[in-house]
Image (cartoon, grey):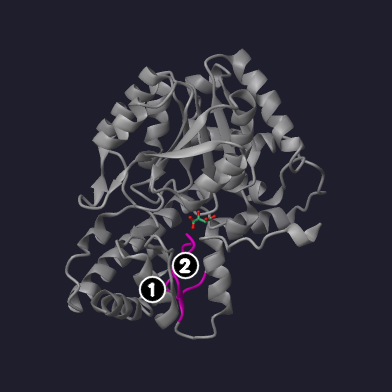
Amino acid sequence: LFDRVELAPADPILGLTEAFVADPRPEKVNLGVGVYLDENGKLPLLDCVRDAESRLAADPKPKGYLGIDGSPAYRDAVRSLVFGDGADVLADGRVATVQTLGGTGALKVGADLLRQINPSATVLISNPSWENHRALFTRAGFRVDSYRYYEPALHGIDIDGMLADLRSADAGTVVVLHACCHNPTGYDLTPEQWDQVIETVRDRELMPFLDMAYQGFGFGIEEDGAVVARFIESGLEFFLSTSFSKSFSLYGERVGSLSVVSESADAARRVLSQLKICIRTNYSNPPTHGAALVTAVLTDGALRRGWEQELAAMRDRIKQLRRGLVGALEARGVTDMGFIAGQLGMFSYSGLTKQQMIALRTDYGIYGTDAGRMCVAALNTGNLGYVADAIAAVRSG
Ligand code: LMR
């Protein structure tokens, strides 16, 4: 049987980490995966997480199963964070929320549910989008197309193209939208453009699926989450996936959530019952530890303030790194990449070609995706000059 198994290509993002790990060159830099590293090039353990961890360790608990939909305290904490404390939509019982294995797990559980309730729907993702969106929805059984989004000539969004593509979509089409810090481009819709998208989604009866994996890395927790409130105000039904991988530096704990906002409490109850089947038949129920850490931080005043400060510090430092990279490139004669400073989130969509990205990898041990995405959040004062040298060299070569 296994004779017939084809060798699959490496994952376009996590495969880069595999290649990076195997690269013996000491000067190598991993700008592939979206992971924030500190000034020493190390993955930070946030102080708030360390404190929460100490508290949990001081009072160890038996490790029983969580419910299929996860920890109730965690779900409450997430719902307050993303919908607002005491939001009407929560009080009305219109939101079904489940704890998931990170943001990817949330997308997959959502995709599985959608496939069950609307199997013939097409899924539209932005062009370009996170590499795994297409793969994940395709694997869930959908036809995946894209809507126009990034316009290289503008170094920004082709909003007219995007709206036109949404307008020509069939009713029921699932539209995957990046709530903030668009991955990979770093260009987000303005509030007015969000209103236009919401209007179009409503007119065309599309099903929005908001993916919010980088809350707090754009302008702030509230500012980045404001789009959720816009969707609630619109009265639309929608899916929302969230992740604490980046905002809590809890990558390996796989802590995320999926919320489905319905038009009635009765619909939300039925949706939750189906979400539970999707989870039960995949991995039964989620793990305890990461969610306990996030709950401890979000529900304790001091830890929560500490988290907000640490998240702000990561955000501000990434902005500094962007400016630093632009300055270093300019000092090397590359004067047309100033747009990097204005992009949001962890990534820079550099405009470098696939060939140039491969040259960065092969000749310099600098890993970014073939599409030209580089994780600015993995730069530091020690590697920034080297990266700028290499970009200048591949640009001139
Ligand atoms: C990324 O885009 O690099 C991150 O979201 C990590 C991942 O799972 O791809």
Pointer 2 with pointer 1, Cβ within 8 A: yes
Which quadrant holds residue 324?
bottom left
Q: Kindly tell me whether residue 301 is visible in this rendering.
A: no
> Does 168 sit above or below residue 299?
above
Residue type at the position of mark 2? Leu
Question: Quick check: 3 left or right of 53?
Answer: right
The residue shown at (58%, 62%) is 9
| Residue in the picture at 72% in, 47% down | 288
Would you say the magenta stretch is mainly helix, strand or loop? Answer: loop
Q: Position of residue 279 (x, y in %)?
A: 71, 37
Kindly identify which residue carries mark 2.
Answer: 37
Let me know if residue 30 is in the magenta part: yes
Q: Residue at x 37, y 62 (%)?
A: 372
Distance from mark 2 CB to nearest ligand 1 atom below 8 Å = no
Q: Is residue 12 left or right of residue 294?
A: left
Q: Is residue 230 left or right of residue 17?
A: left
Q: Which residues are the magenta region?
A: 28-42
Mark 1: amino acid: Asn
The residue under label 1 is 380
Q: Decide: few, some or many residues near mark 2? Use Cα within 10 Å; few <14, some 14-19, many ≥20.
A: some
